[in-house]
Amino acid sequence: MTTNFYEQVYKVVQRIPPGKVTSYGRIAKMLGHHNAARAVGYALSSLKHSDSDHPYTSATVPWQRVVNSQGRISIHHREATANKQADILREEGVEVSENLYVNMNVYLWEGLHLLEIDDILAGN
DNA sequence: ATGGTGACTCGCG
DNA sequence: GCGCGAGCCACCA
């Protein structure tokens, strides 16, 4: 792959429509890295609030639409960030329970197929 | 080059 | 359903 993994993750996340969510593991699989879920999470955690030299920031990448495979918001060390994620999702119409769970049977974004992924990574 | 670090997952008790 | 342990991965120092 020519583009770096993080960039690929960001591009896929940007395809998640408002009101839907997906998991770290699913994104990894979409990119052909079936076991790179941790790396996906790491990619999102490294997003900056703003970065003049980088097109991908927490403002341009809907990071809040990614939860763990159980449908639960997966930020344990930063409670403030976790709650913010829940708030943003609710604004988008996604129901988030008090214990930070999202019903994946209702809000799961099925994602893309490898063919579409190639298209996106190639340009748009 | 090597080892540490997670916003992960799965499987087992 | 919950906690734990063990894989697994891209990054970075």
Image (spheres, coloured by chain):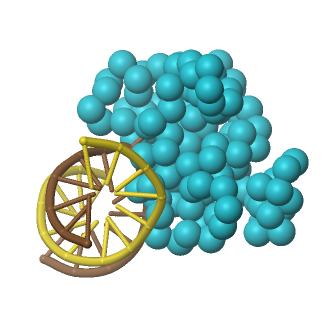
Chain colours: A cyan, B brown, C yellow
Vertical comparison of A80 with A26: above or below: above
Above or below B3: residue A9: above
* Towards the viewer: A107 or A22: A22
Q: Quadrant of residue A112?
A: bottom right
Please tell me which residue is depicted at 49% across the width and 45% down the height of the picture.
Answer: A43
Q: In this view, does A77 lie to the left or right of A67?
A: left
Q: In this view, does C3 lie to the left or right of A54?
A: left
Q: Position of residue A95 (x, y in %)?
A: 59, 31
Looking at the picture, tell me which residue is in the foreground, A34 or A20: A34
Residue in view at x 47 percent, y 20 percent: A84
Image point 87% across, 48% down: which residue? A124
Q: Which residue is drawn at 56% across and 32% down?
A: A64
- Inspect this view and state whether residue A103 appears: no
Badge count: 0
Quarter where residue C13 is shown: top left
Where A99 sits versus A23, above or below? above
Q: Is residue A39 visible?
A: yes
Q: Quadrant of the N terminus of chain A?
A: bottom right
Q: Position of residue A111 (x, y in %)?
A: 72, 56
Query: How far across and down, in percent of the image, does residue A122 sit?
Result: 83, 57
Asked whether A117 or A75 is in front, the reply is A117
